[in-house]
Every structure is written in structure tokens, then in C-alpha cells.
Amino acid sequence: MSNLQSYSEPREAKLFRNNKSQAIRIPVDFEMPGDRVTIHRDGDRLIIEPVRRRNLLQVLAELKPLGPEDQFPEIDDSLLPSKDIDL
């Protein structure tokens, strides 16, 4: 996988059909990290960007605090007790 560069010379790429979707063969020197991208249109241009994985701190920062209305569910006393597991 190549390093992402801020600018590179334009290259021609092959378009093809994949079922009902149009797809593009991305040359190896334009390869992106990961297996997902976001895509949006800017006029007649398509902008393709890699989806960045969020780290744990980012996920936690987006969580809403628990309030008094957030109650833990009642525990079913009829369930068998859990077994200790030796690791």
C-alpha cells in the first residue's frame, strides 16, 4: 500500500459495471487504506475518501451521560448462577 499524497498527477482509470452499480479500477499508486470509503459529489467531480476508524476516546466522547431515567433492568432470579471460568 502506498502512502497517501496530498497531490498527484491525474491518471485515467477504467470504469465497469458490477451488477447495477458502476465501479472504477483504482490504480495501485492511488490505493487507499482500509476496506471502506465515503464518496460525495462536488459539481461534476466525485470525491472518494477513506473511512477513518475512530479510537476509543473518540467513541467515549460521543456517548451521552446516563441520567436518572436510565435504569438497569431487573435481574431474573430464576436464572442459573454463572460459573467461574479459569483462564
Image: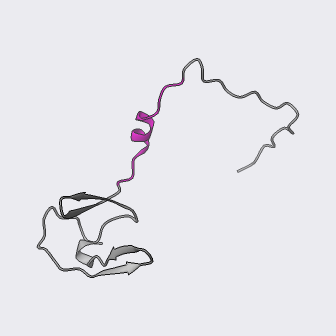
For image coordinates 81% across by 40% down, the residue present is: 82
Which image quadrant for residue 67? Answer: top right
For image coordinates 18% across by 80% down, the residue present is: 12
Magenta region = 52-66
Magenta span includes 70: no
Residue 80 image position (x, y, % from top left): 87, 39
Q: Is residue 40 above or below residue 2?
A: above
Most foreground residue, 72 or 3: 72
Residue 15 image position (x, y, % from top left): 29, 79
Most foreground residue, 14 or 87: 14
Q: Is residue 87 above or below residue 28?
A: above
Most foreground residue, 80 or 52: 52
Residue 16 image position (x, y, % from top left): 33, 81
Residue, far top: 68
Q: How many marks?
A: 0
Magenta span includes 55: yes
Q: Is residue 82 above or below residue 75?
A: below
Which image quadrant for residue 81? Answer: top right
Quadrant that contains the N terminus: bottom left
Magenta-highlighted stretch: main secondary structure? Answer: loop
Rendered image coloring scheme: one colour
Which image quadrant for residue 20? Answer: bottom left
For image coordinates 23% across by 63% down, the residue present is: 46
Q: Image check: 79 left or right of 8?
A: right
